Image: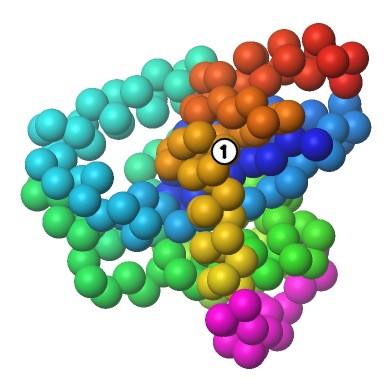
Amino acid sequence: MVDLYFSFRSPYSYFILPRIIDLKENKNININFKVVYPLAIREPKFFKGKNLFTYFLLKTFDYMRVKRRLNMEFNPPKPDPIKQNILTGKISSHQPIIFEISHMGQEMTNRGFGLEFAYELSKKIWSEKNWNSDENITKVLKEFDVDLDEIRKSIKVNEEALINQIKQNQKEQLEAGHHGVPLTVYKETSFFGQDRFHDLVSLLKSDGMI
């Protein structure tokens, strides 16, 4: 089994998903998908002193590099799942998007579709304007025969449990050795970043798993 710690705000989490899905579907590797809140929620101090020129611009250049190498569709999200002023790095106290999609991701995980749902939604986050519209979310959920109104009601009823599950994921993530995403873990060995995927594969091969 491979644990995957994932954030809906992380481009690198999105970039690793096709390869993780390939492990699951074509290599028969069991993937334990674990939603965590973005660093902006978990560790807002991480962004102290980070702004457009000291952080975000450099990151964007790297996102484009990875996009080209992996031949994946990618554009800066509109809107950003996290409400943050990238000029100053200041994170808003009002977050109208990230909690709903994180809780939806956890609910879909509980229903057995977490990884696949994350990929389908991430493709919209990183390519389409107004990806978070009810119309777009409905299209994603329809692929899993899930109704938007129904899952929103379920999330509202189970919100405390969903939050606790995500917090438990975050606790286990730190115990695994890192606060960043994507983080893959196999047999107590952790690999931080989408660029460490080949190291994960090498370990799986050495164990005769693939």
> Image point 50% across, 49% down: which residue?
7
Front one among 42 and 107: 42
Q: Position of residue 154 (x, y in %)?
A: 67, 84
Q: Position of residue 38 (x, y in %)?
A: 41, 53
- Residue 111: quarter of image: bottom right
Front one among 47 and 8: 47
Front one among 143 and 169: 169
Q: Is residue 103 above or below residue 62?
A: below
Q: Are there few (<14), some (14-19), or many (20+) residues within 10 Å of tag 1?
A: some
Residue 19 can be seen, yes or no: yes
> Image point 52% across, 54% down: which residue?
171
Determine the secondary structure under disc 1.
helix
Give the residue at mark 1.
176
Q: Is residue 152 magenta?
A: yes
Prevalent SS, magenta region: helix
Placement of the C terminus among the 4 image quadrants: top right
Q: Is residue 108 above or below residue 194?
A: below
Residue type pointed to by label 1: Ala
Residues in magenta, as a range: 143-161
